[in-house]
Amino acid sequence: MTVRQIEHVIAGTVPASVRFGDVFDPNAGCVQARVTLGDAAVLDVAVQAALKAQPGWAATNPQRRARVMFAFKALVEKNIDELARLLSLEHGKVIADARGDIQRGLEVIEFACGIPHSLKGEYTQGAGPGIDVYSMRVPLGIGAGITPFNFPAMIPMWMFGVAIACGNAFLLKPSERDPSVPVRLAELMLEAGAPEGILQVVHGDKEMVDAILDHPAISAISFVGSSDIAQYIYARGTANAKRVQAMGGAKNHGIVMPDADLDQVVNDLAGAAFGSAGERCMALPVVVPVGEKTATALREKMIPAMAKLRIGVSSDPDSDYGPVVNAAHKARVEGWIQKGVDEGAELVVDGRGFRMQGHEEGFFIGPSLFDHVKPTMQSYKEEIFGPVLQIVRADTFEDAVRLPSEHQYGNGVAIFTRNGHAAREFAARVNVGMVGINVPIPVPVAYHTFGGWKRSAFGDHNQHGPEGVRFWTKVKTITQRWPDGSPDAGSSFVIPTMA
Ligand code: NAD
């Protein structure tokens, strides 16, 4: 049987590939396609096409650029069933969740449709005698995005939606584990009217990423993935004088105050900890009940709720969550469960050894629950990125604020309470970038901005919203004077002031 091959989307002819990566079907546990892995020579073909296309695109007025984004949004909506199926088939998340992945990306495209407004500059009439000052936001040139496997639609759209609307050309290096949807998105951008070379997809692994980091014509790099790689991207990219934003891993805590509605909390936790098999950077894999009574009650309610979870093939509308992305990731998650046991945490529910009838080779993992997890444990400190929920008991509200604040990651956090004062205090004091108050997955809407703190993000600008526009543009400031022709006062040798 011939295996489907996933190619780059490049406006030019590239050298034939000699390296390929396997793309698995996580439900069946077998290879379903292979993706071509590019190198510096392939990248350079794409860069040359981008260099050719970008000046014309930057000179296209913002309203016309926005029209391409409108057309793209309509095309994605028209094709959403096909895209969601493709995404689910490679990633393993259930179809409804795959649609959510696409929809969240489309919301950034909707933001990008308003780009003329976002690009308006500032103006001061009469900043000095006969002098006006104004600023304009101009595109950087060529931007690149390196994206993770867990949101193959949303995260590319976070990046290229804003970058392209701002007038840049964009090179997308998607995860080699689920590259098909990014390819389809690039095809739909072309169909929507984006000129050739404005959005290209270059596949690859570290070799391609390093080529991107070192290519002198690429001005800015946006990365989302795990923290060690994010830090590497940030260090090497900035050393090469590029603008870099690099989002990393997470370990989000859900604080449960004694006055919280526990039934609601358990519902919210089930979705936030186990949805998408826990493969979300905004999942809630740690729950912190405040007080022994809260902990005992929460644990008692959580166990039966977990027993009701339906793990199944990702195309089954009745499945709550599907398999993890590949065998290596499955082994990694199960390794962390064992580590938790070895470190002395109590494994209350063990999801290992789960076999899906008829899909015995699939990468399925049942839900796991740990209690009495301690902040000193490695399995608490590190990201597991699987369907594993850890209970870390706190005695007081102060302890609960301290746990996420002192954790190495600071992506998201949530507090569940009926007490507005406690919630307000928590939101103000916790050392984390995105906070939910009775909202388990506090992913900000597209016209706000997404980004964590500490080891969850390197660089200064967040993703999308006004921060995204700032990241993908630079500011030019013009000071203008139009003399009326009357005689000049002659040279001045002092710095001009407005005194
Ligand atoms: P990953 O770090 O393995 O891969 C991300 C990208 O980096 C991929 O495109 C991959 O090809 C590339 N890459 C991998 N190894 C590399 C290396 N040695 N050198 C250069 N490039 C390399 O991440 P993943 O497993 O695809 O995604 C899951 C991770 O992403 C989790 O840690 C998750 O928390 C994180 N994530 C973070 C956010 C956020 O916004 N903070 C969002 C989604 C996912």
Image: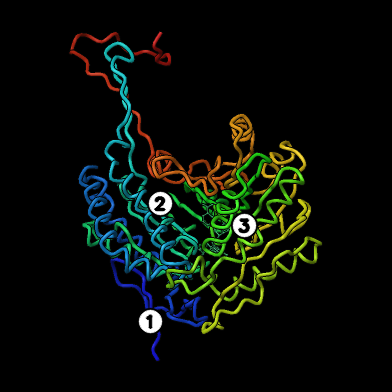
Per the rendering, the mark at residue 4 is 1
Q: Is disc 3's CB within 8 Å of ligand 1?
A: yes
Kind of residue at badge 2: Trp
Badge 2 element: helix
Kind of residue at badge 3: Asp
Is tag 1's residue or tag 3's residue first in the polypeptide sequence? 1
Q: Could one spot residue 163 in this view of the protein?
A: no
Crowd class of label 2 (few under 14; some 14 to 19; many from 20; radius 10 Å)? many
Answer above or below: position of 392 versus 133: below
- Residue 282 placement (x, y as % from top left): 54, 52
- Residue 427 placement (x, y as % from top left): 59, 35
Gap between marks 1 and 2 measured at Cα: 28 Å
Q: Are marks 1 and 3 in contact (CB under 8 Å)?
A: no
Answer above or below: position of 326 versus 11: below
Question: Badge 2 is on which residue?
Answer: 158
Badge 1 element: strand
Residue situated in front as seen by the camera: 190 or 303: 303
Colouring: rainbow
Q: Are marks 1 and 2 in contact (CB under 8 Å)?
A: no
Kind of residue at badge 1: Arg
Q: Ligand 1 appears in which quadrant?
A: bottom right
> Residue 17 falls in which quadrant of the image?
bottom left
Gap between marks 1 and 3 measured at Cα: 32 Å
Question: Badge 3 is on which residue?
Answer: 228
Is tag 1's residue or tag 2's residue first in the polypeptide sequence? 1
- Residue 440 placement (x, y as % from top left): 55, 48
Badge 3 element: helix
Gap between marks 2 and 3 measured at Cα: 22 Å
Image quarter (top left, top right, bottom left or bottom right) of the N terminus: bottom left
